[in-house]
Image (spheres, rainbow, N blue to C red):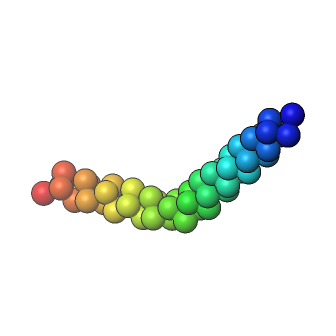
Amino acid sequence: MNWILIQQVVVSIMAVAVILSGIIGLIKVIPEINRICRGEQKNTHDASRE
């Protein structure tokens, strides 16, 4: 029983760590993605005009 409980605790901690790191990563990356998307849209419009 002890090993099963330890494994469950370790797995849950790892899952929480992965989820938190993913959320933090998304929060940091979202502004960059918005900038890149806006830049690409402007570039495509400029290219189509040329």
**Left or right: 18 with respect to 10?**
left
**Which residue is at a point 31% across and 57% down the rendered structure image?**
40
Total numbered labels: 0
- Relative to residue 24, is residue 9 depicted above or below? above
Q: Nearer the viewer, residue 6 or 40?
A: 6
**Which residue is at a point 61% across and 58% down the rendered structure image?**
21
Q: Position of residue 44 (x, y in %)?
A: 25, 53
Q: Work out which residue is located at the far front of the displayed protein and give it.
A: 2
Q: Position of residue 46 (x, y in %)?
A: 22, 59
Q: Work out which residue is located at the far right of the displayed protein and give it.
A: 1
- Relative to residue 27, is residue 11 depicted above or below? above
The answer to whether any part of residue 38 appears in the image is no
The answer to whether any part of residue 32 appears in the image is yes
Q: Nearer the viewer, residue 25 or 35?
A: 25
Q: Position of residue 5 (x, y in %)?
A: 83, 40
**Left or right: 8 with respect to 31?**
right
Q: Which quadrant, please, contains the N terminus? A: top right
**Which residue is at a point 85% across and 40% down the rendered structure image?**
2
Q: Position of residue 50 (x, y in %)?
A: 12, 57
**Which residue is at a point 79% across and 44% down the rendered structure image?**
6
Q: Nearer the viewer, residue 46 or 7?
A: 7
